């Protein structure tokens, strides 16, 4: 009897591997798609416009480097 082991390669689809911290904000991974999220960017721009954030704070939030 010839037994052949079966190897199953699990492949992840693009986008499944990044780890984005939940919380509806930007994370510190510059390759994460959240930095291209129009809703998040609009929200940040709105807070900036309303004076809730300084440009410095907005930059910190956008880069995720608290
Ligand atoms: Zn992210």
Image: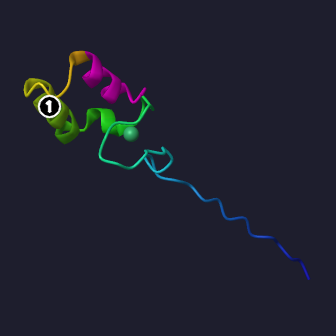
* Residue 11 point in image, percent of width and height: 56, 55
Q: Residue at x 39, y 50 (%)?
A: 22
Q: Quadrant of ligand 1?
A: top left
Q: How is the image coloured?
A: rainbow
Numbered range of the magenta stretch: 56-66
User: Residue 65 in magenta?
Assistant: yes
* Residue 45 point in image, percent of width and height: 14, 28
Q: How many marks?
A: 1
* Residue 15 point in image, percent of width and height: 43, 46
Q: Residue furthest right?
A: 1
Q: Residue at x 86, y 76 (%)?
A: 3
Question: What is the magenta segment's predominant secondary structure?
Answer: helix
Is residue 40 positioned above or below 57 on the image?
below
* Quadrant assignment for the N terminus: bottom right
| Residue 49 shown left or right of residue 3 in the figure | left
| Residue 19 shown left or right of residue 2 in the figure | left
User: Residue 62 in magenta?
Assistant: yes
Q: Residue at x 89, y 77 (%)?
A: 2
Is residue 8 positioned above or below 36 on the image?
below
* Residue 17 point in image, percent of width and height: 51, 47
Q: Residue furthest bottom?
A: 1
| Residue 35 shown left or right of residue 5 in the figure | left
**Quarter of the rendering containing residue 6:** bottom right
Residue bearing the label numbered 1: 47
Give whichever of 65, 2 is nearer the camera.
Answer: 65
């Amino acid at each position: 009897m010839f037994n052949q082991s079966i190897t199953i390669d699990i492949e992840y689809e693009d986008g499944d591997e990044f780890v984005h911290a939940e919380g509806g904000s930007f994370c510190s991974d510059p390759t994460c798609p959240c930095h291209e999220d129009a809703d998040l960017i609009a929200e940040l721009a709105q807070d900036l416009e309303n004076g809730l954030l300084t440009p410095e704070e907005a930059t910190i939030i956008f880069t995720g480097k608290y």
